[in-house]
Amino acid sequence: MKTKILILFALLVTAISSCTNSETDLRYVRKNANSSEALADIEALDSAMTVMKLKGCDDPTSWYYQAAIHWVPSHIDSNKLCESYSDWTELKMAWDECTHSHSGAEEINFLIWHRLYIWHFEKIVRKLSGKADFALPYWGYTNYDKRDKIMPKKWRDVNSSLYEEARLDSLNNGHPISGGTLKVIQNTYPKMMQITDYQTFNSYFDQNIHGQMHNYIGSGNNPGSVWYYNKIYQRNSHFGMMSEVPSAAFDPIFWAHHANIDRVFQQWLNSPNGKKITLQQLKDNPWKYQFFDENGKSVVYTPEEVLAIVYNMDYDYDDVKVKENLKASDANIGPKQIIGSEASNKVLKEAATHVATLDNPANYDHQKTLLEIYTTFDTDPTGFYEVYVNHADGKPYDMQSESFVGVMTFFGANHSDPRNKTCLKGCCNPVSEDGKLMTVFKYEINTSDKYDVVVYKSGGIQTPNLKVNKVVIRDYQK
């Protein structure tokens, strides 16, 4: 019986992978949006986005509908962009499905859900643009070439459908990524590529480069001094479109940003550290995979179908092959055993705050350890915080130092707040015992005899009552 099931599953993989591009044997190539090779695809995207913005929000192939699949505000007074939607009781099919909760399941589904999400968007653009070989361009800001730190030109053109005013003005004016965000990209990208655990990679990617770029595009390194008009919320705010989960996908740069997120995901999958999710792990961490094809028809995937597609896509990147890494081992999913813990209860009100000292158990000899930092807060923290382990006394805090392990960014930290009606569909962020919002940050670190953990804020606005409640180390044994 077990043999028959395996055969049937193999046939399903073959059938689905063979029809991902059923109309032609063409393999699509996603190109760097700052390259001349991508110009035709960018023009096609601009053309299609113009059409999508003219469509009504009840059309699944419209700009509004596609963005709302990611998320949409739970309440909008007099919604001029979508009159049939005013609050969460009127959510349309497949809206509010993105993996920006902290329930645990997002660590499994975050990257593969977004992979299928932008893939279906790509198909819609291909049909609406009429460009048969269209592939979604990516903004390669993780590249080492300084030219790729500049937002691609078409997204900065005020006459283009890809332009959005509610962004950091320096990006819209053609200046490169700078300051703390540039340092975050330069110093967390190589660390991320060395991660050996699937869950940790998902979490680290989400809360470091991914989250920091969302915040930066929308509001800069230190938001709070500039006002934007967010046309999705239809109100003025200190946060641009990309800084807020419910409005992020309405900014057209979202798609180029997430194409790069998917590209870096594939870089890791192709590397010796890459791990593959299994069918049982998808079943144990369920998420709704519902999208729309190029004709506006609903497509719902079972875990079996997700697994059959996600490693057998019909596209490559101009510098990365999207293929299954046959040498990669299966991911190790599930809670890891706690081997050390300290109730810190430290408010982050100083530039540098020592939050814990933990001793490594004498019998623990694995070369890697999982570090977790539990934070609580009243309001969404702004900017980012650097994390250091065993930093040398008297040395300045610098992300290039060996003691730097990553950052804490809070993109979506107050999303799905269970203390109000925005906690929908079970996507509830955790709340501490004293009723505050809580976010847990995870880092793969080298095993040491002890771990002195410091959280550092290099500049910008300190968030009142941001606290590290607890610091934990966990067993990384395979």
Image: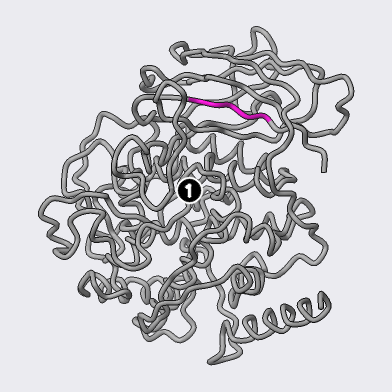
Q: Position of residue 462 (x, y in %)?
A: 38, 19
425 or 144: nearer the eye? 425
Which image quadrant is residue 19 in? Answer: bottom right
395 or 150: nearer the eye? 395
Q: Residue furthest front?
A: 1
Q: Where does label 1 land, which residue?
A: 149
The correct choice, above or below, for 311 with respect to 126 in the image is above
Element class at badge 1: helix
The correct choice, above or below, for 20 with respect to 190 in the image is below
The correct choice, above or below, for 44 with respect to 240 in the image is below
Residue extent of the magenta highlight: 371-375
Q: Position of residue 447 (x, y in %)?
A: 80, 27
Quadrant containing the N terminus in the rendered view: bottom right
Colour setting: one colour
Q: Callout 1: 10 Å neighbours few (<14), some, many (20+)?
A: many
- Asked whether 384 falls inside the magenta stretch, the response is no
Q: Is residue 387 left or right of residue 8?
A: left
Q: Is residue 320 left or right of residue 119?
A: right
Q: Position of residue 72 (x, y in %)?
A: 30, 54
Q: Is residue 28 visible?
A: yes
Q: Is residue 154 visible?
A: no
Q: Position of residue 364 (x, y in %)?
A: 86, 27
Instruction: Look at 49% across and 66% down and name the residue there.
Output: 289
Which image quadrant is residue 3 in? Answer: bottom right
- Asked whether 373 falls inside the magenta stretch, the response is yes
Which image quadrant is residue 67 in? Answer: bottom left
Instruction: Look at 49% across and 83% down and name the residue there.
Output: 133
28 or 334: nearer the eye? 334
Instruction: Look at 63% across and 14% down and name the residue there.
Output: 356
- The rendered magenta stretch, by its main secondary structure, is classed as strand
Query: Mark 1 is on which residue type?
Result: Lys
